[in-house]
Image (tube, grey):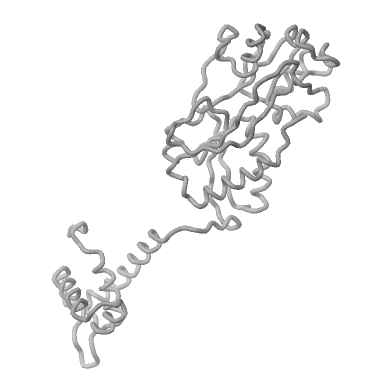
Amino acid sequence: MNVKRIDLNLLVYLNTLLKERSVSRAAEKLGITQPAMSNALRRLRDLLGDPILVRTSSGMAPTERATKMEPLVVEALSRAELALQPVDHFEAATSSRTFRIMASDYIETTLIAPLLGRLNEVAPHVTLDILTPSDASFADLERGEIDMAINRFDHLPDSFHQKSIWRDNFSCLMGAEHPALDALTLDAYLASKHIWVSKTGIGVGTGMSPKYSQKLGWVDEALADLNEKRDITLFTRNYQVSNYLLSSKKLIATLPTRAALLWKDTPGIYLAKPPFPIVPIEIKMAWSPVLHHNIAHKWLREEIKVLAATIKGSL
């Protein structure tokens, strides 16, 4: 039997007939005329090759086949109703959903860490699966296999939804023995060795070199505007740079301020404002149209938006 050729409304008629065991009562229950219900019963009999209901001394009774079909019909209609029911509520307190988020360690430490604390309070059974930018692709995000990506993006596909999370200025991190600790001038900055830290966008990154000045990003573009260039001795995609700073007297790491502030209470690490202006970076949350109307996804986006507004971003 080809289900594509079957009027699935017949399942509703069959379910009601088996419950009411009367054509007239079934018609009244569904708000249709008795002739219309009689016609539905005739179509069911033709389709199944079975009388469905037969007359007995005590009234209409289902046949053996109809009796066996009844629980299957009830289950099929229940599943269909559940599938088609609009979802307008998300129970955070009881949900056990896993949300997959692509984020660099800058976002992981500044935003995801406090988000986890918040979720432990309001959604204790929710799980976060954090992927690095190199673990994901725009295709993964577009298909909804990743719930969202949070990062700085040079570009995003037009089909993606996006929300600005924050704008972040830059700050300099130095070890306790750095000679410019008391006065970080532009000359002192340029005389130092530097750690380049960045992980932009989504997907596998490319190798870096000081000669690729046009690819080095915000800090180096700001220096280029002054016809200056810094001496980069280390390229890394990891924002956890304190060990490098503590091992050298001349290293400076220029990081987004929210990342730098994580080290403000670390012994031997000091923060300073850059001695030249740098355009702030914008961090965005991006997600697929596949998940845009998902009620759980909407809830998480709102939680992130509210939390992000509370995270300090200045020295």
Q: Position of residue 4 (x, y in %)?
A: 21, 57
Q: Position of residue 98 (x, y in %)?
A: 53, 46
Q: 295 left or right of 218? A: left
Q: Which residue is drawn at the image coordinates 61% and 47% (left, top)?
A: 303
Q: Which residue is drawn at the image coordinates 76% and 21% (left, top)?
A: 273
Determine the residue located farthest toward the right in the rendered image.
182
Q: Quadrant of residue 209?
A: top right
Q: 263 left or right of 84? A: right
Q: Quadrant of residue 91?
A: bottom right
Q: Position of residue 115 (x, y in %)?
A: 65, 43
Q: Which residue is drawn at the image coordinates 64% and 20% (left, top)?
A: 197
* Residue 42 vertical placement versus 145 (above, below): below
* Residue 215 vertical placement versus 6 (above, below): above
- How many numbered circles does the render carry? 0
Q: Nearer the viewer, residue 60 or 37?
A: 37
Determine the residue located farthest toward the bottom in the rendered image.
57
* Residue 79 vertical placement versus 227 (above, below): below
Q: 139 left or right of 285? A: left
Which quadrant is the N terminus positioned in?
bottom left
Q: Nearer the viewer, residue 215 or 50?
A: 215
Which quadrant is the C terminus positioned in?
top right
Q: Which residue is drawn at the image coordinates 61% and 22% (left, top)?
A: 198
Q: Position of residue 107 (x, y in %)?
A: 63, 33
